[in-house]
Image: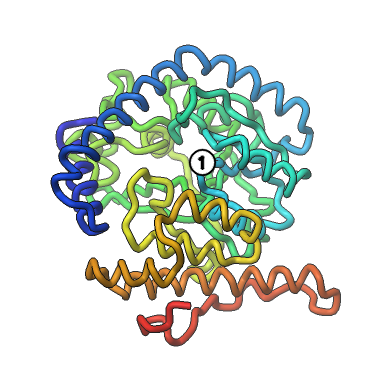
């Protein structure tokens, strides 16, 4: 991490903790040293996981796929992070009919056992890792590319798809590198960079490209010398990165840039804005106080009933929602944040109910997934925090 990135992360950590009511002395004398130790441990684990366990994971993942004939193209992976079941369960419930597999990336044994019991039909692969560690997103994507000769996709666990039919049978021609849902455009070059929230890869095209240029999906602060000329020919470089608000090439950015260099296309997945909701920043170590409210609301969903008590104790340091709301108001939190998060969870609850009705009521037929997921008309009324 560069000095600029470190300072940005530290400022964000300090600001969020102060907004959450932490005292400056506690932050300086307790929380900051604790965070430094955690970062050192994470860095050591990243090195050791790569040097010691990477080959084991690669071999085991190949063996796993050999035993799962349904993972032979057109399937999607959900990467299961620690303490994220309250997000994952509604995500999976909405993806009914898709060919899924779960990659457990640091998720605990209890979570793994719960998923196996609830979804015995969904293949589950547990990465071998040092305790309390996870692989970086790009490392998991590299492992998936190594194990897959056929096209596959990835879906974030905090992305909720209301019309999963749009993800079935995606066709990619020989010149299309991948399909995507979200993207951003580099303003200086006009080049499109899809984001990893939802991607469906043309594996026979991308694997040879990655091998040819010696690329991985990992973030990078440096442009490899072997592709520097090609990157500069696109108008990119250290002075013009794909994302202008960060000082590195994010996950898959170098691969996407080289796909642009080779004249590849990118296909937008046909989902309207109302047919998907992405929350974002849900697995970071430090979250805004408003996200505690989000966790509380998500745990009220019927699909999270069996994990509610356990996850409340893990995630929310308040006895109930009223106590949390009182504390939020005491810290002068913006109630509009809570109202907006309420709108998200209300829309999610509505679509989950429609999905369940369509499965349990034969006469109901399929739910109208294209119907606008409009929250309550009171979405901007802070008093409506149900």
Q: Position of residue 304 (x, y in %)?
A: 61, 59
Task: Judge left or right: residue 175 versus residue 18.
Answer: right
> Is the image coloured rainbow, by chain, by secondary structure, or in one colour?
rainbow
| Residue 293 visible in rendering | yes
Figure check: 334 above or below 202: below
User: For residue 262, which quarter of the picture?
Assistant: top left
Q: Residue at x 72, y 41 (%)?
A: 116
Q: What residue does disc 1 label?
A: 81
| Residue 233 visible in rendering | no
Q: Position of residue 122 (x, y in %)?
A: 73, 43
Q: Residue at x 51, y 41 (%)?
A: 81
Q: Which residue appears farthest toward the right when viewing the image?
A: 362
Q: Which residue appears farthest toward the bottom when viewing the image?
A: 377
Q: Position of residue 313 (x, y in %)?
A: 49, 52
Front one among 202 and 288? 288
Number of labelled discs? Answer: 1
Which of the image's four quarters has the N terminus? top left
Q: Secondary structure at mark 1?
A: loop
Q: Is the residue marked by circle 1 packed among few (<14), some (14-19), or many (20+) residues within 10 Å?
A: many
Q: Residue at x 65, y 32 (%)?
A: 125
Front one among 12 and 205? 12
Q: Residue at x 47, y 59 (%)?
A: 295
Task: Judge left or right: residue 310 versus residue 115.
Answer: left
User: For residue 342, which quarter of the picture?
Assistant: bottom left
Q: Position of residue 27 (x, y in %)?
A: 19, 44
């Amino acid at each position: 991490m560069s000095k600029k990135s470190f300072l940005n992360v530290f400022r964000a950590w300090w600001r969020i903790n102060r907004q959450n009511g932490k005292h400056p002395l506690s932050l300086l004398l307790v929380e900051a040293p604790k965070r430094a130790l955690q970062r050192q441990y994470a860095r050591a684990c990243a090195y050791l996981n790569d040097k010691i366990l990477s080959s084991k994971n690669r071999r085991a993942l190949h063996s796993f796929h050999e035993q799962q004939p349904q993972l032979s193209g057109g399937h999607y992976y959900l990467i299961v992070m620690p303490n994220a079941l309250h997000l994952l369960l509604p995500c999976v419930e909405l993806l009914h009919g898709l060919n899924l597999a779960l990659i457990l990336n640091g998720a605990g044994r209890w979570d793994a056992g719960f998923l196996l019991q609830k979804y015995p039909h969904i293949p589950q692969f547990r990465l071998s890792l040092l305790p309390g560690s996870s692989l970086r997103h790009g490392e998991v994507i590299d492992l998936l590319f190594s194990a897959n000769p056929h096209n596959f996709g990835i879906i974030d666990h905090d992305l909720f798809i209301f019309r999963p039919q749009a993800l079935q049978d995606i066709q990619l021609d020989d010149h299309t590198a991948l399909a995507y849902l979200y993207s951003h455009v580099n303003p200086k070059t006009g080049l499109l960079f899809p984001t990893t929230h939802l991607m469906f890869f043309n594996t026979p095209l991308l694997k040879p490209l990655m091998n040819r240029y010696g690329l991985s999906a990992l973030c990078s602060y440096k442009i490899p010398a072997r592709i520097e000329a090609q990157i500069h020919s696109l108008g990119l470089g250290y002075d013009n990165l794909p994302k202008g608000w960060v000082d590195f090439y994010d996950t898959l950015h170098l691969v996407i840039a080289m796909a642009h260099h080779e004249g590849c296309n990118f296909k937008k997945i046909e989902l309207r804005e109302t047919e998907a909701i992405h929350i974002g920043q849900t697995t970071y170590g430090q979250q805004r106080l408003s996200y505690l409210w989000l966790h509380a609301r998500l745990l009220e969903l019927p699909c999270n009933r069996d994990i509610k008590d356990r996850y409340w104790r893990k995630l929310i340091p308040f006895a109930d929602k009223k106590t949390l709301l009182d504390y939020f108001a005491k810290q002068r939190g913006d109630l509009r944040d809570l109202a907006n998060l309420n709108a998200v969870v209300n829309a999610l609850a509505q679509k989950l109910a429609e999905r369940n009705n369509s499965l349990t009521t034969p006469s109901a037929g399929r739910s109208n997934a294209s119907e606008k997921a409009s929250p309550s008309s009171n979405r901007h009324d802070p008093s409506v925090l149900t």
